[in-house]
Amino acid sequence: MHHPGVSYEGKSVSRAARDPLWSRVFLIAGALVFLGVLLVLPLATVFVEALRKGLGAALETFANPDARYAIWLTLLVAGISVPLNLVFGLAASWAVTKHDFRGKSLLLTLIDLPFSVSPVISGLFLILVFGVNGWFGPMLNSLGLQIIFAVPGIVLATVFITFPFVARELIPAMESMGREEEQAAVILGASGWQILRRVTLPNVRWALLYGVLLCNARAMGEFGAVSVVSGHIRGETNTVPLHVEILYNEYNFVAAFAMASVLAILALLTLVAKTMLEWRIQRLQQQVVLERTRHRDPALVGPQP
Amino acid sequence: MSAAKNQKVLPGFGIALGYTVLYLSLIVLLPLSAAFVEAAKIGPSGFWEILMRPRVLAALKLSFGLSLAAALVNSVAGLLVAWVLTRYNFPGKKIIDAAIDLPFALPTAVAGISLTAVYAPRGWLGAPLAELGIKVAFAPLGIMIALMFVSLPFAVRTVQPVLENMDSELEEASATLGAGRWTTFRRVVLPVLMPSILTGFATSFARCVGEYGSVVFISGNMPMKTEIAPLFIVTQIEQYDLPGATAIAMIMLGVSFFFILFINLLQAWNSRRTGTTKA
């Protein structure tokens, strides 16, 4: 089963057995065809198109200095944004889950806000603040600092888009572990930093890794927001997704799909790592999760045997 | 939560909350307030004038219409996929389950160019469909498929855990009382799933409305025909018409906000009616 222990093996089998064979086969086939056409076919196409003129032609893409610069810039941007959002995620989840204060739900709503803003619109927001005629643009320009159409703008856009990722994973993880262990550490005389490092972090390390993984995948792949603020200058403000677009619009399809396959491989690795982490987190927190669902939602879970 | 007795025990509250609020203000609130201030400068009549431009109306209609359509189709397909993944066993199920999140992991630009390659007039699926007279790429149907691709995980992942945690006793009772499988599904299973299906629908829709990267390649970007609202915003920015871009952005944010509010109200109504709680 998908979540061993959370769903009940025996009962699921008996439920499935009640559906006639033809309807089971029909539903499974329907779902598989749908997923095959919608998900698998486009993924396979990336690699097929990249290798259309052979492996050599595909690999030639990466000899181009602009392509190499794009890869370097993408690594740089992710290397700055992910740690920034990781530190924020730690601070936010510590404040929210280990303390009580007024306005907590407002804070949680604001943390999730970037998820509901279109990437293009978040790029526009940054232009309104840092653009040539924006709030701080002229002042920063006079200091010789350019944000929009430069690397800092790309970093800011990426930070905005990936803002909630780490916090979102850490908050439920810290919430579910409660406060007792930290309180015991305080009584034993541990400092705040010691508690975080020796008590809290070991307990939430998989959730933290999970958040970082998702944050990184999005940071390296972000297109809309970065596209708006980048200016698309080759060898200066072009990340890998933007370089894919440029190559594609020049009808250089092999190179575009070769660059795209780098991102597709990254996506596949992310999925594998994510799935393995999920299995591990499930094994560790099965008991906790089960307890919490029972308490929170008796109507859905029903009385326990 | 046992609030009172824990209140001042754990250290680091000031610095953690202070940093959180500072960082949040710099990264999120500052740009957001800039948008509100700039939007206020446009004024109601300015807003109305921008909204009534035929090209703006067409782009908004296209974006919201296709997002609704994609979210609707995905609600049904997502329910099917979640059902198959939780109720039946078949080879390769774990891999397929993991693959549902592919659209989260795959950058939208990559999805955009590969979907275009698949559905272009000479693509793997585009060619046979063109024979039948169905144009997908560079037409609204192509935009809808791209939107379905990016939002599918929302539709599946909201319903799946509810199906997993659902107790079989209700269904057994229904079967004992003589109901067929279809009646049981419609009258017993579906009402329990409804809140999560609505949540999935709302999040899919919100994601679709803002989507840019995967759509911009497959849509063909013809004004009045296949130009979605986010693309129109980009065009306005490139032409330095920031007030125009801001106005459309605020209209989109507003409509999305009211849509999500509406779904939440619908859910509250639904849970009162059926006695089930939110997933």
Image (spheres, helix red, strand yellow):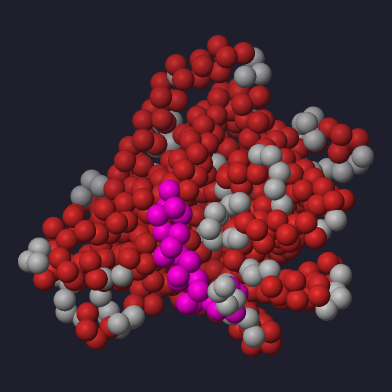
Horizontal side of residue B145 vs A132, given as left or right: right
Q: Say which of B150 and A291 sits in front.
A: A291
| Horizontal and vertical percent position of residue A69 | 38, 27
Q: Residue at x 71, y 75 (%)?
A: B170
Name the residue: 80% across, 45% down: A29
**Magenta-drawn stretch, dominant element (helix, strand or loop):** helix
Quarter of the rendering occupied by the C terminus of chain B = bottom right
Q: Position of residue B82 (x, y in %)?
A: 67, 57
Rendering quarter of residue B255: bottom right
Residue at the farthest left position:
A189
- Which percent across, then down, holds residue A295? 47, 77
- Highlighted magenta segment, given as a residue range: A280-301
Queried whether the magenta region covers residue B229, the answer comes back as: no
Write down the quadrant of residue A273 in the picture. Answer: top left
Question: Which residue lies most toward the right here?
Answer: B132
Q: Residue at x 22, y 79 (%)?
A: B6
Q: Which of A215 and A207 is in front in this view?
A: A207
Pick whichever, A104 or B9, lies toward us. B9
Quarter of the image where one finds residue B24:
bottom left
